[in-house]
Image (cartoon, rainbow, N blue to C red):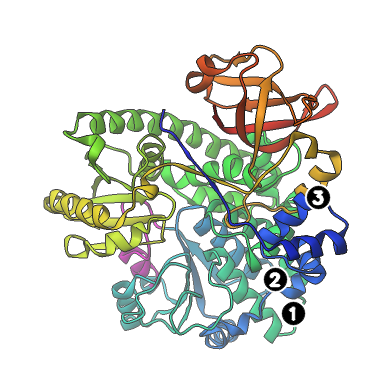
Amino acid sequence: MTQKRWIYKPSPDNSTIDLLQNCLGVEPEIAFLLAQRGVTNFDEAKYFFRPNLSDIHDPFLMLDMHIAVERLERAFINNEKIMVYGDYDVDGTTSVALFYGFIKNNLYQNITFYIPDRYTEGYGVSQAGVEKAANEGYSLIVSLDCGIKSKDKITWAKAHNVDFIVCDHHRPDDDDLPPAVAILDPKRRDCQYPFKELTGCGVGYKLLEAYCLKNKIDRDLLLPYLDLVVTSIACDIVPIVDENRTLAYFGLQQLNTNPRTGLKALMHTAGTEGKMDITKVVFGLGPRINAAGRIKHAYDAVNLLISNDYNEALDFATIIGKHNTDRKSIDSSITESALAMIYEQENYSEAKSTVLYREDWHKGVIGIVASRCIEKFHRPTIILTASNGHAAGSARSVPGFDVYEAIEECAEHLIQYGGHTFAAGLTLELNQIENFKQKFEKVVSQKISHEQLTPLIDIDLKIDLDAITDKFYRILSQMSPFGPQNMTPVFVTENVYLHEKPIKMKDIHLKINVFQKNNSAQKSIVFTCVGFGMVNDYWEQLEIDKPFSICYTIEINEWQGKKSFQLMLKDINF
């Protein structure tokens, strides 16, 4: 077992904690957590706890937004054929469903959508896609969650009288942008948009919002589409702060009160029970939507998300569910093979990175496999497979290390690449794999720190078990939606003892009932703790009357109509 580092987040200023405690009437622990998240006064607390759609940013602050809206208007007036083009992952398919669905249902009929095939066309704007548009008389393509790195394809399209509006959120090469009519990307160097971390679907939403504002269309028409936006926010793992927090907050409301037909069918087939939150979207809906593009074609996902017929949607959801079952089997097999390859490598334990290639690995799951390898070997990982005569790969990183930047330093060995700080995609010639592998290891070795190579747990606060009350949990849960930069609070409690012998669940999961002794030797109430996959790590060390510390999040467990607190263990220290 690799020892994890417990890292406490910086403590906020005591005067801020006192102010919040007094003006909000909350426990000091809650005031601490709020201050930790940048809340410093009553008004900021109100904004944090009660997001309002009127507070989101003016879409026209985004560079090229006026141009994009005017080009859309001209297309509508001239009855031009419009193609909505999106990537095959969750962000891409929700983007297409949002943009195509809203326009088709409310504004304009001469519109279609296109998703590239992951295996024959690859990521981003494809030559096959732009040729189809040109050959069939489309004069405008709106690309969503892609396009910022597709200069050659967009140049070809322009030469064949096809205009592009690019809606993307990936890092641009500001000195080599594609010749699109408008490029909407808050990460552009010269874009003054206040929030940089929108999803591709979020950028598409802002374009529709801008169109509605200019044409005096009620923006409430967009509200039913927020369930798509929150799905993209959850599954693309973007920071849930600022505008994303507001969009996610109202998106979850939509998902829990009146979800679109396709998501309702998907929740039914996925067996997601109770109130939907970010975690349930990520693990319940995301893998299924992604599985369509991984195993077959993402058209199934878009058709599900735009369907207005429940029986039809159930059919699509069932198909996608089968794809997801197949995906699980494939990724399990490839992960086993990848881990075996790592163990076979000389000096594998000293390496600072992992780069693996096999021509027969399924391209649709290599990103998942990279993440699985990081769970075992905590270091930047790239999994490559054969694709159209080249090697195509997915990169994943560890907290604090910019894998995109590292890949960029290896650009001389690559055909193309793109992505984010912690996840990227790349393509290279087969004869460059070994050269790339060596250069990547060299770059990572020079840049990565020892701390980044050790798994860490970010801890919000040390508390006593007696602090966990109904009121405490009620306010804690109101701090949702949780996600990057507003993660579910992680607590540490020290001086904890077993109340009785530990229990094994399915031979791998750990269940313990614990209490805490305070300074006066009084016992706290008993709490149940669950640690998934922790039996092998801690079973032998757990003993009656032996004190230990627990690191955990707090959940509510409901069993036979009764609710109780349950502590979800992240780690144990002795």
Relative height, residue 9 to residue 191 (above, below) = above
> How dense is the environment of label 2, judged by Cα within 10 Å: few (below 14), some, or many (20 and up)?
few
The kind of residue on which mark 1 rests is: Ile
Alpha carbon distance from label 3 to label 2: 39 Å
Under tag 2, what secondary structure?
Answer: helix
Q: Amino acid at mark 3?
A: Ile
Q: Nearer the viewer, residue 173 or 106?
A: 173
Determine which residue is flagged by label 3.
Answer: 475
Image-based side of 502 in relation to 453, left or right: right
Is residue 120 on the magenta stretch? yes
The tag on residue 106 is: 2
Q: Residue furthest left?
A: 431
- Three-letter code, disc 2: Asn
Q: Distance of mark 3 from mark 1, alpha carbons? A: 37 Å
The earlier-in-sequence mark between 3 and 1 is 1
- SS label for mark 3: helix
- Stretch of the chain drawn in magenta: 116-133
Q: Give the residue pinned by disc 1.
A: 217
What is the x, y in percent for residue 492?
A: 64, 39
